[in-house]
Amino acid sequence: MRRIGFPWSPDLVTRALASAGGTLAAARDAVETGRGGTLAGGTHHAFRDEGSGYCVFNDIAIAIAELRAAGKVRRAAVIDLDVHQGDGTAAIFAGDPDVFTLSLHGGSNFPFRKQTSTLDVALADGTEDAGYLEALLPALDRVVEFDADIVFYQSGVDGLAEDRLGRLALTREGLAERDRLVFESVSRPLVVTLGGGYADPIELTVEAAAQTYRMLAAL
Ligand SMILES: [Zn+2]
């Protein structure tokens, strides 16, 4: 409970299972139609054997494992643009040549003990749109080169300047440009998960996340 940060309850069990199941369903949609999304998930701090940082199970890892076991995909990539490092995802797939994990995150933010992704890009506190997008472009090129059968996008919007936990200084327009670059670069089945967002007022987070899903729906 201390590491996860939620009090234990039957509702939490239901929520954690539904969230992981939602990402799996979105991944199956993506295999069939080219895209899928869930308004939850992206619980990237969960490790193989324990939860952490508001994350109980690692939904993206579960979906990748299930699709591979079913023979639907062989290689997968994870584009994790939540402001916090995707440490659980990185650890779960460390040493796995068929999964590329990209994490672009605040270098001094949680988790304070970082794991090693296939590609980590650590950003300084206060990074603005221009610096962020400049760092993102070459990282996306690496994902494209990997040529996965399916790509998961953890689209957390906690890089927003008004976010209470983010420490970056991105605008809503900057986040829209970020999403556009991701959607334009990925030509494989794409799965979008929600990730984090803690703005004050929270409506700013909701609006930023909604614009991601509107863009996905318009693809
Ligand atoms: Zn986050």
Image (cartoon, rainbow, N blue to C red):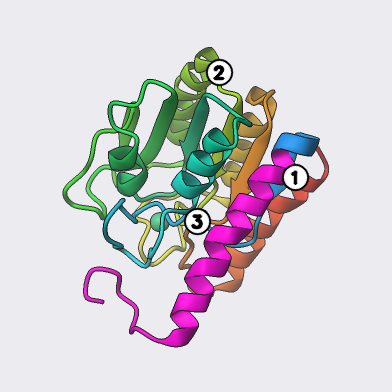
Disc 2 marks a residue whose amino acid type is Val
* Place of residue 156 in the rendered image (x, y in percent of width and height, measured from the top left): 50, 53
Q: Nearer the viewer, residue 155 or 190?
A: 190
Residue at the farthest front position:
70
Which mark is drawn over residue 215?
1
Q: Is residue 47 above or below residue 72?
A: below
Q: Is residue 176 visible?
A: no
**Measured Cα–Cα span from mark 2 to mark 1:** 20 Å
Q: Nearer the viewer, residue 203 or 70?
A: 70
Quarter of the rendering occupied by the C terminus: top right
Residue 171 is one of the magenta-drawn residues: no
Q: Tell me the residue at 31%/51% (across/down).
A: 48
Which residue in the structure is indicated by mark 2?
144
Badges 2 and 1: C-beta atoms under 8 Å apart?
no
The mark that comes first in sequence, 2 or 1, is: 2
Disc 1 marks a residue whose amino acid type is Met
Residue at the farthest left position:
113
Quarter of the rendering occupied by the N terminus: bottom left
State left or right for residue 65 relative to residue 190. Answer: left
User: So how many labels did they put on this image?
Assistant: 3
The quadrant holding residue 167 is: bottom left
Q: Tell me the residue at 49%/62% (across/down).
A: 197
Q: Which quarter holds ligand 1?
A: bottom left
SS at mark 3? loop
Which residue in the structure is indicated by mark 3?
195
Q: Ligand 1 within 8 A of label 2's CB?
A: no
Q: For the magenta stretch, what is the residue range?
A: 1-30
Q: Nearer the viewer, residue 13 or 169?
A: 13
